[in-house]
Image (cartoon, coloured by chain):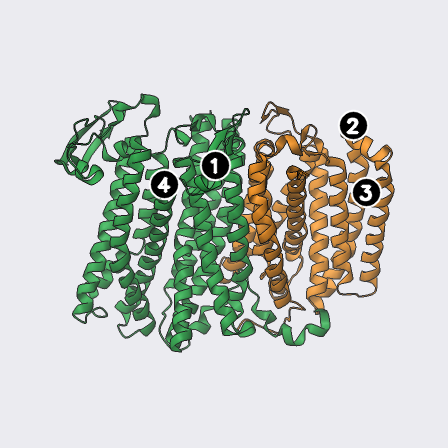
Chain colours: A green, B orange
């Protein structure tokens, strides 16, 4: 025991903490990398330098956030072994190669072209520079593809057999990679990353429009972000709904916990519980505010199909409704708020007031971090909803943990917490400071300062001068 | 003929780890040496020499770790808990080292904090890796399919020795890298460091090599029994050859020879470890075949590796080519 927690609880909290801290960064950089590619493409096509300035503005921020994503990601690649060694031994033959493909096809691609993207514009020409930006963007998407395949396999395992050592071994790679929940989860997460980025970009644009409504760079950001909110947020709601239907099919206990349905509805006609106080101990939900029939209509599209409740599962196989009932509702509420802001912006745009509506701008600033909140709540919902399993229905979390003492896991957890708050706290402050700089015209770009996480501007002349010395 | 996939993969993982050690080795070495440069401009110049490549270099570590999970999951599952504390310490060091590249230029009053984070992060990462290596060489207690030793098994005089040896060795790589990539006062200081770190590295390679055969009977048999004892002549002779090239290069004011001679020392030390280890992946008893995932896993990833690793080497080489030559202290950021 360590501070009253056992090693399993501490290992779970450590993974939750490190992965939650990590997901913040890729949720932003996946979208931002694509946004940078679009901006550079627009600049190349139109020749309008305003796009280049917006590109340079976000490129600097991308470098800082990407660096934090890299270092927090390396921690994740070792977390499986340090705290979840039994899981690694058993699931490694299936998920390991998928992660191997992530490293080979995504991480090296990003790292290899980031330097050229950040600093190479004057060295490699426009075409190759744009190619580098595209490679970074594609790298982030490849990364999402493989890691979400891994996560989805843990949720809806497929294409495997179990050998005499108790390991999951591949039986059909196609079925394992494209396991039943993967297409839904990938779509839902990539859209979430795009929305997260759109709302950050929109908030920064709105912030600077509030100060100066003629700021061209801020206008470009805000207008593009609001188009994204208008179009992608409703698509995301549809994607999320389809994802939920898939979950009902493969992980009905998770859906029952999300819905707050302790009692099953064998005859159908389940009400949608908008709010209530779930109590896992008593296996009941109190003080509910319900809409009759709606849960059945959403989940089964009829009023007669049976819907299971948590009581239909043994107590040891139930995910904790007390947590994911709430995180799911927060995620959905944020999603609808995003749709609302998109509609509001469309109305303002129609009236020609997109650059002038101060209340819209203030709302967009307030919504800036909303994507992160939704992403975190969504991940908590799906991951905690998978409990008590690491590989759903097959390998229990309690049977996955490393043979470590609580003091070892607890001490490393405290170190992670302290270091992450210092390092990522400072990083967040630096990012906010960068966002405070105006993206307007003029000489703004030159005062953004150097960026060098993977580039080396002093060597710009090396190609010409340094060749004889050491080249 | 059936391909021996675990053997092929052991070679690929060894390649990834070696690539990491020599590539991030000079990055970490530059970090370790950075506090010795008094002027902020000199520290910045030293950092600039590795800024374009550190991220790619560090990715080899992810391939080493992630690859181990993919193809030798049992080894991964045993080694990570066994080396828990040094691994966590290494990750912390790499966090401070990695964010420093950006944070140093974003911070105002706290710049010095991230400069020290860069130096200490590099030092801690290097020392932890050396400790982990020593603990692995000493052998790991395994029962069934799990680590069976205690929390502090990794901490021994030998692992501290290898920790120090790796710090000194990385400092040598960093110093000779700076000799190659800089000029003026930074280069002169780096050359002085390279002399000391070079002498230290060669001496520590000798000490570690003399101690290692007595840790495990297998190591002794490998190095002292025919026919493998032939390596006991060849490898030390090549080490001495590289040492001569290193010091001759330093004496002759050569720019590149010391760096490549230092790389040679690392490659030879790595080969020496391989000679001791083979056919085990986790000494003293877990062989590469016992630890390997089924052939279906190895074959699936091998297809990708054979296509993607040459591409990776290609665009990595291109990045080094783009940023080749000396980093000019007169060139500021635009």
Q: Secondary structure at mark 2?
A: helix
Q: Nearer the viewer, mark 4 or mark 1?
A: 4
Q: Could you classify mark 3 by the number of other residues whose Cα lies within 10 Å: few (under 14), some (14-19), or many (20 or more)?
A: few
SS under mark 4: loop
Which residue was labeled with disc 1?
A413
Circle 3 sits on which residue? B206
* Subunit under mark 4: A
**Dot label at residue A181:** 4
Closer to us: mark 2 or mark 4? 4
**Residue at the farthest front position:** B1
Task: Determine the CA span between mark 4 and mark 1.
Answer: 31 Å
Callouts 3 and 4 on one subunit: no
User: Label 1 marks which chain's residue?
Assistant: A
Label annotation for residue A11: none
Quick one: quadrant of the C terminus of chain A?
bottom right
Mark yes or no: residue B205 visible.
yes
Q: Position of residue B194 (x, y in %)?
A: 75, 57
Depth-wise, is mark 2 or mark 1 nearer the camera? 2
Using a 10 Å C-alpha cutoff, classify the residue at mark 1 as few (fewer than 14 neighbours), some (14 to 19) or many (20 or more). many
Q: Can you identify the residue that label 2 sits on?
A: B217
Q: Given contact means CB atoms under 8 Å apart, are the residues at marks 2 and 1 in contact?
A: no
Q: Depth check: A32 or B174 in front? A: A32
């Amino acid at each position: 025991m360590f501070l009253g927690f056992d090693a399993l609880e501490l290992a779970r909290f450590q993974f939750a903490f490190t992965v939650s801290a990590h997901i913040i960064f890729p949720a932003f950089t996946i979208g931002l990398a694509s946004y940078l590619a679009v901006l550079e493409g627009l600049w190349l096509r139109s020749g309008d330098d305003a796009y280049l300035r917006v590109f340079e503005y976000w490129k600097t921020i991308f470098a800082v956030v990407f660096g934090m994503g890299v270092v927090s990601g390396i921690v994740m690649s070792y977390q499986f072994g340090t705290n979840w060694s039994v899981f690694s031994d058993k699931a490694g033959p299936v998920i390991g190669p998928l992660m191997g493909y992530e490293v080979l096809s995504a991480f090296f691609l990003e790292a290899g072209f980031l330097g050229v993207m950040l600093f190479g514009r004057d060295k490699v020409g426009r075409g190759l520079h744009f190619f580098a930006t595209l490679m970074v963007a594609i790298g982030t998407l490849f990364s999402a593809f493989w890691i979400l395949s891994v996560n989805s396999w843990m949720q809806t395992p497929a294409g495997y057999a179990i050998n005499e050592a108790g390991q999951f071994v591949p039986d059909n790679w196609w079925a394992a990679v494209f396991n039943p929940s993967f297409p839904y989860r990938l779509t839902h997460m990539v859209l979430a990353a795009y929305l997260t980025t759109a709302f950050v970009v929109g908030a920064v644009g709105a912030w600077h429009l509030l100060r100066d409504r003629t700021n061209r760079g801020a206008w470009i950001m805000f207008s593009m972000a609001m188009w994204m909110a208008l179009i992608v947020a409703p698509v995301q709601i549809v994607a999320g709904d389809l994802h939920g239907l898939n979950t009902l099919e493969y992980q009905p206990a998770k859906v029952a916990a999300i819905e707050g349905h302790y009692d099953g509805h064998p005859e159908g006609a389940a009400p949608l519980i908008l709010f209530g106080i779930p109590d896992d101990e008593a296996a009941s939900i109190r003080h509910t505010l319900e809409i009759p029939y709606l849960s059945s209509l959403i989940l089964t599209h009829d009023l007669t199909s049976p819907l299971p409740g948590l009581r239909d599962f043994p107590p040891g196989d139930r995910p904790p409704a007390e947590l994911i009932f709430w995180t799911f509702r927060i995620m959905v509420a944020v999603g609808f708020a995003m749709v609302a802001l998109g509609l509001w912006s469309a109305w303002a745009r129609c009236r020609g007031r997109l650059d002038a509506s101060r209340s819209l701008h203030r709302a967009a600033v307030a919504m800036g971090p909303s994507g992160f909140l939704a992403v975190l709540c969504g991940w908590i919902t799906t991951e905690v909803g998978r409990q008590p399993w690491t590989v759903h229905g097959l390998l229990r979390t309690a049977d996955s943990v490393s043979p470590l003492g609580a003091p070892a896991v607890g001490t490393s957890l405290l170190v992670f917490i302290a270091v992450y708050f210092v390092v990522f706290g400072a990083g967040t402050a630096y990012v906010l400071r960068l966002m405070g700089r105006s993206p307007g015209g003029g000489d703004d770009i030159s005062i953004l300062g150097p960026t060098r996480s993977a580039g080396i501007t002093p060597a710009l002349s090396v190609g010409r001068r340094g060749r004889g010395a050491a080249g | 003929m059936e391909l021996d996939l675990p053997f092929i993969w052991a070679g690929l993982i060894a390649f990834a780890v070696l690539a990491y050690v020599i590539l991030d080795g000079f990055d970490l070495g530059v970090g370790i040496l950075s506090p010795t440069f008094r002027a902020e401009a000199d520290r910045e110049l030293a950092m600039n020499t590795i800024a374009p490549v550190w991220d790619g270099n560090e990715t080899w570590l992810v391939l080493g770790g992630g690859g181990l999970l993919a193809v030798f999951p049992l080894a991964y599952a045993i080694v990570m808990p066994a080396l828990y504390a040094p691994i966590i310490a290494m990750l912390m060091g790499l966090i401070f080292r990695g964010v420093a590249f950006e944070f140093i230029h974003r911070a105002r009053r706290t710049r010095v904090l991230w400069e020290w984070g860069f130096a200490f992060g590099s030092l801690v990462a290097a020392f932890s890796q050396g400790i982990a290596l020593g603990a692995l060489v000493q052998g790991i207690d395994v029962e069934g399919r799990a680590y069976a030793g205690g929390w502090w098994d990794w901490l021994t005089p030998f692992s501290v020795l290898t920790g120090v040896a790796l710090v000194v060795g990385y400092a040598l790589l960093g110093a000779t890298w700076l000799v190659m990539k800089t000029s003026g006062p930074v280069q002169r200081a780096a050359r002085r460091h390279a002399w000391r770190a070079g002498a230290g590295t060669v001496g520590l390679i000798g000490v570690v090599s003399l101690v290692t055969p007595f840790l495990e009977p297998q190591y002794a048999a490998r190095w002292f029994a025919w026919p493998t004892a032939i390596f006991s002549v060849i490898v030390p002779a090549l080490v001495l050859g590289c040492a001569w090239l290193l010091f001759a290069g330093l004496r002759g004011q050569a720019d590149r020879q010391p760096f490549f001679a230092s790389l040679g020392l690392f490659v030879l030390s790595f080969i020496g470890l391989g000679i001791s280890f083979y056919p085990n992946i986790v000494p003293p008893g877990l062989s590469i075949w016992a630890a390997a995932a089924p052939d279906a896993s190895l074959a699936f990833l091998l297809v990708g590796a054979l296509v993607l690793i040459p591409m990776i080497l290609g665009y990595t080489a291109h990045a080094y080519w783009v940023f080749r030559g000396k980093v000019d202290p007169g060139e500021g950021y635009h």
